[in-house]
Each structure stands twice: as C-alpha cells, then as structure tokens.
Amino acid sequence: MAPENSLSRSMNSAIKHYSSMFFLPPYKKALFTIAVICIGIVGVSTFALFGMSLEGLANSLALGLSLFALTLLIDTVMSRIILGVDPIYILRRTVALSLFCWVLWGAFILIGAIFASMFGLLMWVKFCLLGYAAVLTLRAVVFIATSAASISRRLLSALLQPTLCIVAFLVFWATNISSALPLQVLPFIIISPIVGCAAVFLFLSFLDRLGKKIYSMPSMPLFRAFMLNWVVGLNAPLEGFLERMGEDADIEVTLLKFNASKPKAAVIVPNVHPGPFKNIGSSLLPSLLKQRFEKQYGCDTCVPLGILGHELDLASQPQNHKIISHIITSAQFDASDNVATPLVKVTHGPATASCQIFGKTALLSFTLAPKTTEDLPQELGRIVREEAEKYGLDSAIVVNSHNSINNIIDTEEFLEELRVAASNCLKKAAALPTNPFMVGAATVYPKEFTLKDGMGTGGITAIVVQVENQKTAYIVIDGNNMISGLREKILESLNASGFDECEVFTTDTHAVSAVVTGRRGYHPVGEVMDHNLLIGYIKNVARGAEANLEPSKAGCLRFVVPQVRVIGETRLHSLTTLVDKGIQKAKQTVVPIFALEGLFLVLLLTLF
C-alpha cells in the first residue's frame, strides 16, 4: 500500500499540473493585450510593409480592428452559445485562450514581416498562414482534450476563430497584394485544418491508450472529469469514474450519544476515511454528517477520525448519503447509561492514550503529539476492542486524534507503543469508580477561517463532560491534522480556563485538500491561522458547552452499513500519478507528431 505522504505528493503534483493549465490573466488585461497584438503588432507590421501613407495606415488599422472585433465576437458566441453547456469555458477563459493564440500567431506575423523586408511580401503571407495552422492546432488540442461539449461543438470552437480571422487576411491580401492570391492559398487554408486535427487526434489517442492500459478506460474523459472538478468544482463526472473503479465494502459505524431532557450531543465514528480531496468522495462526510444529524436530532455532533487510512475512501456523494441516512435511522435508540468514569491518560514512550468509560462503553483516543499523528492501521482498533472486552466492556469507540504533523511521517514506527498505552489506559480506567455525569456541548463556525486556511465547514465543536469534580473538554476541529505544538498550546489554555482534562481532535476532512498548492496540498490547522484567534474560539466554545451542562445518559451502538462503494489508496495513488505519466507520454509524442505536421505544411507552402 502506498504511504500517505506518497499519495499526498502525487495528488499535490496533479493539482499543480491542472492549476498551471488554467492560469488566467484578468479579463480586461487579456482583452487589452489582444487589442495591442491585433492593432499594434499586426497593424504596425502591415503599415511598415505596405508603405507609410494615410491609405496604408487606414488599411492596417482596419485589418487590426477587424481581427480584434472578430476575436471578441467569436469568444462571446463560443462561451454563450457553442460551448454554453460547458461550465469551463466562460468568456474569461475563451478570451484567455485567444490571447495565447494571438501571442503565437503574432510571433509568426512579426517573423514573416522581417523576412518579407528581405525576400518579398509573399514570405509574410506564408508565415501568416503557418501561424494560422499553428493556432488551429493549439485550439484543437485544448478544446478536444478539455471540453465536455459534443465533438462537433469542440471542432467548431477550434476552427471558427482562426478561420474567420484568416478570411480578414484574405480580404486584405486581395486588396493590397493580388486579387488572385486568395485562390492560390485556398488549398492550404482547407488542408491545414484537416492535417492539424488529424495530428491532434493521433496525439490524444496515444494518451488515451495509457489510460486503457492502466484502467481499461481512455485517459481523456478521465482528464476532463478532473478538469471539471478542479476548475469549476463539479464532482459528479469524476465520481462516476471512481464508482466504476471502486469496490463494495461493509462500513462499520460506532455512535455514542448523550441524552438529557432531549438529545444533548453525539460522537459518530464511521469507519470511513474522509477523502480523497476537495468535494470528491467522502471528503465532506464529517461536515455533512454533522449537519444532517444535528438537523434531525437537534444536538451538537462531532465526527472525529477513526482508526484507518485511505483504503476506505468513499467513491461518490450517493455513498455519503447512504451512510448518513443509515446513521440517522439507526440513532433512534435509548441512552440508558447514567454513570461514567473520569478521563484518564496514559503515556508510553511518544504514545498517549486517553480513555473515559460511559456505562459499558469506552471512548479511547490516541495521539503521538508532538510527533506526527497520521492515519493508523485498522488492526490497532481491533486490538483495542478486544482489550476492552477483557475488562467487561461491551464496546469501544476508538479515535485517532490526528492532531500533530511535522516534516517527519513516522506514525507506523510507534504501533507497539500505541498498543501498550491503550492497554494500560483501559486497565486504569476500568479500575476507577463510576458516578453520574453531566454533559454540555456547543459549536462555533469561525468566519475568519476558510477551506484554504485549513478549516472545514464543520467548524469547532466542544463536548464537556463533568464527573464529580473533574471537568473534561473534548474539542473537535473540522480540519486535516494540526501543526506540531499547537495541541499543547490549546490544552494549556483550556487548563487555565478551568478544565481539568482535555483533548483536541481533527476530523481529517480532505475538503481542505487540493484547494491550495504547496508541499502538502493543504494547510493543517494552525499553519496559516492566527493562533491567538483560533485558541480564543476554542476557549469560547468550550465555555459555551460548559454553560449548558446537564445530567445526562449515554448510549452506544455499533452497526454496519452494507455494500458501500469505496476506492482504495492504491487506486487513488495510481490515479493521481496518471497525470505525471500522461505528461511524460505527451512529451514523448508531441515533438514527432507536431514536427511532422509542421514539415508537411511547410512543404505544402512551397507549392505556391
């Protein structure tokens, strides 16, 4: 199984490739630059070539203005009518593409003007035609590869702008060079789009074969699905592929709820990894589940991470809703346990285990903080549940605190220390007397922190438990891990606020992943956040939970959601590395295919 950091690197590499493809200059700046190229470069070069007279100036300006007007008109028509069904190609993106095309075509026009000053006007015409063919090919690659519109609309989008612009050149040439010239170059104007599109289809077919070889499906539809997600946030196209590539699994869920006069709080731990990224698969599951459960039962809810890794990412939103619906239905049971132990912590080496028992249910969490605490193997959860049975407990909710990350990923080196810490912690907790307890809960949604900062839409939830004189605060932050050292600062602040014991968890939501570029592809909690502001929110929400403490009862249920579609870490890793493999394949094939096309077109130009 590929390690977590390897998967993160491959996803981050894919993000960089996709984001670089869709770097967009501001709309007004792009439009102004096109005007400069069309009116300035094209106009100035023709004015210099055809004599510096008022008539020459008028003709040159007319050509430049007509090219600019045609470009803007065609881009508007494309974005609103021809490609109106494609969410990627809004006007800003069609104008940006036209800018890149005019930079390319303008270079050919300038070089042609230089050669024309030495070898005659026909050389300028030939370079204009070569620029026309190059732009056709570029547009064909872009639209055929990235657009989700029908093939006829993609081809029309590739051909329309260069074709109408070359017509403007033909009118200019017929007026200023020779009335017979348009007929002479007409064969090139007809043949070059055919040759260009053939080269593009050949090029893309090589990339398609790569996907067929790895996944038995063509690469380009998968590429377009990625584009739709990264560029405009559509998840359904990509999730369709994940559904096909995935497999069915039975998903275990553990639910601990607290009731007072009405539902008070809930801790839900589905055996699902909240990934792989952004709004794909189960990335949003912690916040979606929290919102739906709170709406149904009216109590603050948190969804900390269980003991597992990317081997159980859900394939799509329907799978999220299948699990959520099952949990909502299953939660209609009585909470009858009215006693609990205090929270105890045991440290063994770098491993710390925290445990509190409610009736016959142990709530146990792990952390290696300040060392990196990343995904833990499912086997560790099974060991803990078996240990809990030895002490007469009916069930155990096992949580990965996922609350510390630095540059060293070494979690699996400390599995034995984690096991020993858990065993000793369970033994110590099971030996304590039980007493009635009170529970309070609250949630806050910090408006200053966004997905790009590392805060998911689930915000910060606090559940406070008081047993006799001990007051414990459980803090759950909807984020993907936390920078090393921040956990200790939070615990110290909560202790100073009157809480005897506390622990902080993150949900490991991957909704914050793939929304920024960088070493990880996301910001852990606290990496770019103001720590004082964050800790202020945590203290306030903990006090809010403390303020509504009520005598409560606990109830735990373990159940299975059958036949849920998941996609494992190995598949995800190979899927994201397909981007790099595709780039390598493109580099291998792009030069011979398009060099051969260029050679053929140059030879074709020598015929007139």
Image (cartoon, rainbow, N blue to C red):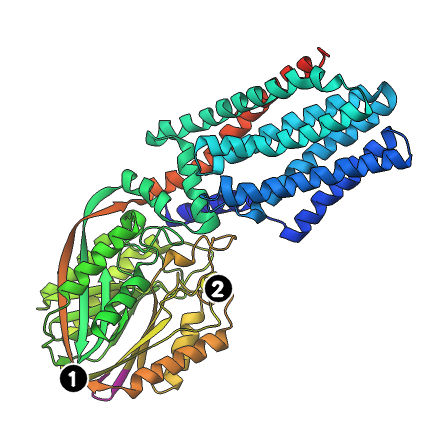
Q: Quadrant of the C terminus?
A: top right
Q: Quadrant of the N terminus?
A: top left
Q: Nearer the viewer, residue 156 or 329?
A: 156
Q: Nearer the viewer, residue 533 or 24?
A: 24
The secondary structure making up most of the magenta span is: strand
Question: Picture coordinates of residue 482 (x, y %)?
Answer: 42, 65
Q: Nearer the viewer, residue 91 or 580?
A: 91
Q: Which residues are magenta?
A: 466-471
Residue at image mark 1? 261
Question: Picture coordinates of residue 369 (x, y %)?
Answer: 38, 66
Residue at the farthest top position:
607
The residue drawn where x is 65% and y is 40% is 71
Secondary structure of the residue carrying numbered label 1: loop
Question: Picture coordinates of residue 541 (x, y %)?
Answer: 36, 80
Q: Circle 1: is it few (<14), some (14-19), or many (20+) Cα within 10 Å?
A: few
Residue at image mark 2? 453
Q: Name the amino acid, label 2.
A: Asp
> Does the magenta-highlighted stretch encompass residue 306?
no
Q: Is residue 118 above or below residue 103?
A: above
58 displayed left or right of 581: right
The residue drawn where x is 61% and y is 44% is 95
Secondary structure of the residue carrying numbered label 2: helix
> Does the magenta-highlighted stretch encompass residue 468?
yes
